[in-house]
């Protein structure tokens, strides 16, 4: 069964989603500035570590922060000696004992940058979906936040706080308008 919704500003899910977007933007800005400062050309990166999600790491967790890039040819020339071999996605991690990795971790902690970002789980807001077994689509258009959820477990009468159910046709018309605005249709 598929059901479609618009999440209002009172929706806990939308509040968490907006918080996630803000943290993501802060991380991107921080990493872009760090890479520019260090002369790293790559624009593809992955930040992560062993610790909490959506919370900044503390001083004692600094050594758990990992910084990976998909290096350009120039990056390989400049930083090849401090980059590990690429993984299956082409990401090379800066060696933990390198000055770049240490400085990156130090600055993440000092600036309270969230290392492990994770978007809110839709299943946390729908009781019938708590244990998984669903797919969903979200997008924002004209200050409305749309959500479509598909699952055999989704109850027909379940409506989380701050959600308004809409017809599937309304959802898909809005999605078409979004694609037209982006010029991908």
Image: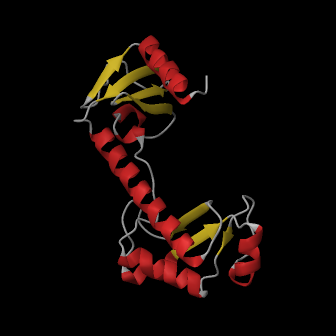
Q: Which residue lies furthest to the left in this view?
A: 10
Left or right of residue 86, residue 44 in this image: left
Q: Quadrant of residue 162?
A: top left
The percent position of residue 41, horizontal first and vertical second, equals: 65, 67
Tell me which colouring the rendered structure shows. Answer: secondary structure
Left or right of residue 127, residue 68 in this image: right
Q: Quadrant of residue 9?
A: top left
- Which residue is painted at 54% across and 30% down in the image? 182
Q: Is residue 85 visible?
A: no
The percent position of residue 78, horizontal first and vertical second, equals: 72, 80
- Which residue is painted at 70% across and 78% down in the image? 83
Query: Is residue 12 depicted above or below 151 in this figure?
Result: below
Foreground residue, 72 or 4?
A: 72
Query: Is residue 115 depicted above or below 161 in this figure?
Result: below
Q: Can residue 64 be seen in this view?
A: yes
Query: Is residue 117 depicted above or below 39 in this figure?
Result: above
The percent position of residue 13, horizontal first and vertical second, equals: 32, 40
Query: Is residue 179 depicted above or below 70 in this figure?
Result: above
- Which residue is painted at 35% across and 71% down in the image? 112
Number of numbered tags placed on the structure image: 0
Query: Which quadrant holds the C terminus?
Result: top right
The percent position of residue 130, horizontal first and vertical second, equals: 40, 39
């Amino acid at each position: 069964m598929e059901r479609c919704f618009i999440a209002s500003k009172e929706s806990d899910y939308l509040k968490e989603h907006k918080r996630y977007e803000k943290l993501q933007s802060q991380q991107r800005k921080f990493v872009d500035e760090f890479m520019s400062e260090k002369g790293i050309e790559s624009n593809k990166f992955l930040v992560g570590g062993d610790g909490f999600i959506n919370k900044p790491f503390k001083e004692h967790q600094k050594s758990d922060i990992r910084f990976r890039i998909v290096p350009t040819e120039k990056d390989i020339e400049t930083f090849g000696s401090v980059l590990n071999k690429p993984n299956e996605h082409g990401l090379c991690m800066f060696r933990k004992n390198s000055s770049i990795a240490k400085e990156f971790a130090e600055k993440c902690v000092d600036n309270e940058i969230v290392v492990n970002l994770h978007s809110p789980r839709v299943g946390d807001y729908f009781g019938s979906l708590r244990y998984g077994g669903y797919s969903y689509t979200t997008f924002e258009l004209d200050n409305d936040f749309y959500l479509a959820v598909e699952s055999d477990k989704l109850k027909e009468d379940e409506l989380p706080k701050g959600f308004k159910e809409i017809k599937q046709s309304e959802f898909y018309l809005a999605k078409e308008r979004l694609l037209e605005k982006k010029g991908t249709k």
